[in-house]
Every structure is written in structure tokens, then in C-alpha cells.
Amino acid sequence: MADRDIELNILNLKEDSLAHGSSYSMREPTYDMPRRKSGFTRFVDTFRRDPNSSIMPKDDDMPPHIREHQGVHYFDFDAAAARTANSGLARELKGRHLQMIAIGGSIGTGLFVASGKTLSTGGPASMLLAYCFVGVMLYCTVQALGELAVVFPVAGSFSAYSTRFLDPAWGFAMGWNYALQWLVVLPLEIIAASMTITYWNPDVNKAVFVTIFLIVIITINLFGIKGYGEAEFIFAIIKVTAVIGFILLGIVINIGGQPDTGYIGGRYWKDPGAFRNGFKGLCSVFVTAAFAFAGTELVGLAAAETANPRKSLPTAIKQVFWRITLFYVVALALVGLLVPYTDERLLGASTDSNASPFVIAIQDAGIDVLPSVMNAVIMIAVISVGNSSVFGSSRTLAALADQGQAPRILGYVDRRGRPLVAILVASALGFLAYLSDIPQQSDVMDWLLAVSALSSIFTWGSICLSHIRFRQAWAARGRSLNELAFRAQSGVLGSWLGFALNAIVLVAQFWVGAWPVGYRDNTPGENAKNFFLQYMAVPIVAVFWLGYKLYFRTSVVRVEDMDIDTGRRELNLPILLAQEQDEKRSWPLWKRVYRFMC
């Protein structure tokens, strides 16, 4: 027994060491390196290309005899899988980083400000139903993503899974769809952050604060994955604390704890009512709700830069359920009780924090200081999402380059494990935020938002479908589910449900895009513009997918051809899992229930 314990301890140590992969922190200097360098020289050296960032040559460098049988244009599955599995990205994220990214990483304008649009369009009941609907859809999706990311913690995550398990053309479309989503979100969030300043001073020059916020976001990302993780850890704590505080305050206000308002209860559900614009009002707020949840999948994208995803990811994935329940459903239920949908301050599509139902609820309660505090929280939340947008777009662009689906230079990884060129390209899009001072800034923001509006729906649907196909390949190879370090709690049925719900949202969005609320009062030109604003992402994805498919002549990956081994990090997983199962059997019931849920 003692020998077995020693063996298991050695395996755990090896696994932890392997978690760092070939990151710079595990490498030893060669003897021909200078013994001493100045601090500035060492700093400059960190930006040089990491010589170990790729173990496979690019397609153009391969000898002709290797690829002549495939024709001039082809997609090399083996090379793409190997490059994403050995990207050279630094693996420094810890469990606490992942947990806070999962819990509060994407809480931003979608919850704090855009919820005002959902309330104004559909009423409190439609808002609550839409967020519950999308919450169920996202729970199934994140469970599927967690299983895939624990098995394959590779660069690019879900876009790489689409390439491996669905079709390289679809993986290309999903990768660029996701990259574009975050590339346009960055200037949107910076503009929104600068507009929060006008809450205190309406005459402020927004360009000054655009510059400040842009510098902050770029600086954080240039500190690498560790800088991103620490920043998001702090931002998430602030956002989570604010939401919990609002929930407690909202309960007190609703039951009459504030003398100025008295008991409110369900008053606004009766007058002006629970629903607005009927069933179409409900369908109209689906995409806004999805936008609020966008970014939850970043926890899967971060797996490639996590020290030990097998141990850290399952806990983070399970906590998404509590984030959906507590921070969205409960908080928005209170918002619907405290603010009537007829309130003129709910300015529809406005990104101004004055339109935030959270701020409005506190103002109506007659509390002087807290609205400013809530506005400051919104500003921090917006900066956080802007920070995540650089992370999400840069990692996706670098992974696309590794797979030969983007310009090669975007795959540049420096000696600190940063995808440096991709970070700079992603950051450069932030300069579009200087459009905030032009008179047409509202139209510019609408069209930028149109590019990203449905992107998350495509991403989530692809994750569910990739999980279904992975399970088919896993079973076809005679593998047992007991060999998986983490299994989706919702199973394959959950992935089918998530995929179906994503499809329903796309259909509903087409309906409300073609025939929006009040379309009879609009001109044909206004209705056409509204349709493209609502459905712009669909033709973009179609062009990417069809263009790549025609050029490379790709086809759907057959189950027997799927690679279910490249990218797996674990050593002797069955022994490690057996050890953990033995430990779990000794736990009391309360601990087993807690660990299942959290």
C-alpha cells in the first residue's frame, strides 16, 4: 500500500509538472547564453519569438511529396492538431483565476445596462423568461465545453473542436466569427466605459477617457496570461460583490424597508403589467439576453493556459450554474419588481449607464450615494469585458494562425508565452472607440453590435454539436466514459437540448428581424435596416464557411477519422482517477453533494 501511495504521489507530481508543458518557466538557459544581461535587455528579449512555440512546420514549408497527393489546396488535420496542442502559450492560470472568470468574468453592460432594453421591450416576465431560457441553454453548453476542454486543453478551444470534430470549413468560420465578435466588442465596451463618466459630468471630453481605458486594457494584456488572470480575479470580485449587494438592497426596498417608496411587492407586474408586446416581445429579447451571457465560454478558451485544467476546470464549470441562477435570474427578477417597463429612463438600445435599471432602482429609492457607486461598478465591469475581449480575440486569432487559417504572423508567441502580434492587432481595433465623439456614434455602435449580436449563438451551438460528435468518436473507439476526467452533468442529451435551443433562438431572431415590433409603422427602408442589424452575423458566417469549403474542398469529418488523442495532457489517468474515487468514497454525504454542485 505504501508503494502504491508513493507511485500515486509521483504521478501527481509528474502531472503538475506536465501542466506547465513547454512554457518558458520550465526551460533552462543554454550554455552559450550570456551569463549577465541588463534589466532592459532581458525585458526586450521577452518579446522575441519563442523557439519552442511550434513543433510542426507550416504547410508552405513542407516538402512537395508530403502533400502532393492532397492537391494544391488541402487542410492538414494532423499538423493543425499538433500545433494547437503545442502552441507555446504560458500555462500560468490557477484554479482561483478560472473560478472567478467563470463566476463573474463576463458580467458587464449586458447585465447592468442592456437589461434595461429587455425590460422596456418585453416587460419583466419576458425578461425573466428570456434569461432563464438562455441560462438553460448556456448551462448545457458550458457542461459540454467543460468535458471537451478537460480532455483537450488546446489553443483555440471550441473553434479547434469544430475543426476536429465537425468540418475544417466550419471550424474556420467559427474561429473568425468568434474573433470578430470580440474584436468589435472592444471599441463598444470602451465607448460604454467613457459614457459612464458622463453620469457625473455630461460635458466631459469622452476621447480623454477612451485613451485612458485603452491604455489600461492594453497594459493588462501585455502582462500576459498571469496579468489577465489577476485583473479578472479582482474585477470579478468587485462585480460579484456589487450584484450580491444589489440583491440584498433590492429585497429591502421591495418589502418597504425604504420609507420613501413603501411596500412595492408585485405592483409593477399588475400595472403596467408583466408582458409587453406579447410573444414577439419575448422573442425580441432573446439575443439581448444571449449578449449578456456572452463570454462565459472564455473559461474553456483559457484551458490552454491553465496549469492543471483537469483539477481546475471542473470546479469552474460547475459554478456557472450558480452564476446564472444568482447573478442573472435573481437580480433581474428584483429589477422587474422595482422598475416599471414604462419608465422613460429605459432608453432602449442606449449604452448610457443612466439607462441601467440597476441605477434607476436605487435612484427611485431615494438613496443619494449608491447610484454613483453602482455607476462606478458598471464602469469597472465594462473595462473588464473590454479586457476579456482582447484575451478572447487574440487567443482565437493565434489558434487560427496555428491551424493555417489566418496569417502566419498572428501565431507569433514570444518568450513569455504571449501571442504578441495577435494581442496588438486585437488592441488596435480599440481605436475605433474614438468615434464616440462624432455625431453618428450611435449608428456606428449599432452596426458594430450587429456583427457580434448572434455570434455567441453560433459558437454555443457548435460547442454542443462538437460534444455530440466527440462522444460518438469516443464510443466508436471502444472508450469508456469512466476514462473521462470530467463528464458533462447534462450528458449528450443536454448537448442536444442546448443545440436545439440555440437553433430556436436563430429562428426567433429571424422572425423579429423581418417583422419587428411595430414594423407597420416603419418605412420599408427602416425595416430592411433593422433586419440586417438583427441578422448580420448569419451572412458573415455563411461567407466564411462557404468560401473556405469551396477553396479547400473540405467535407464533414467522419467519426472513424476523428483524432481523440492529440492534445491530451494527462499521464496515467486511470490510476489518478482511481485514487480520486477512493478518496471520494470516504467523504460524508454533505461533501459529496457540495462537490457535485460546486
Image: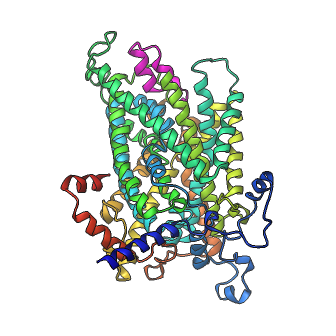
Residue 72, position as x, y percentages in the image: 70, 81
Residue at horizontal 62%, vertical 69%? 403
In this view, the residue in front, 506 or 91, is 91
Q: How is the image coloured?
A: rainbow
On screen, residue 209 versus residue 288, left or right, reads right
On screen, residue 377 versus residue 197, left or right, reads left
Residue 107, position as x, y percentages in the image: 47, 40
Residue 18, position as x, y percentages in the image: 52, 70
* Image: magenta residue range: 349-372
Q: Residue furthest front?
A: 2
Against 496, residue 362 (above or below) is above
Determine which quarter of the picture holds residue 586: bottom left
Against 200, residue 85 (above or below) is below
Residue 62, position as x, y percentages in the image: 72, 82
Determine which quarter of the picture holds residue 351: top right
Determine which quarter of the picture holds residue 593: bottom left
On screen, residue 427 versus residue 245, left or right, reads right
Against 121, residue 597 (above or below) is below
Residue at horizontal 37%, vertical 41%? 131
Q: Is residue 370 magenta?
A: yes
The quarter of the image holding the N terminus is bottom left
On screen, residue 234 versus residue 34, left or right, reads left
Residue at horizontal 65%, vertical 35%? 213
Q: Does the rendering let one see residue 504?
A: no
Residue at horizontal 40%, vertical 15%? 364
Q: Is residue 289 magenta?
A: no
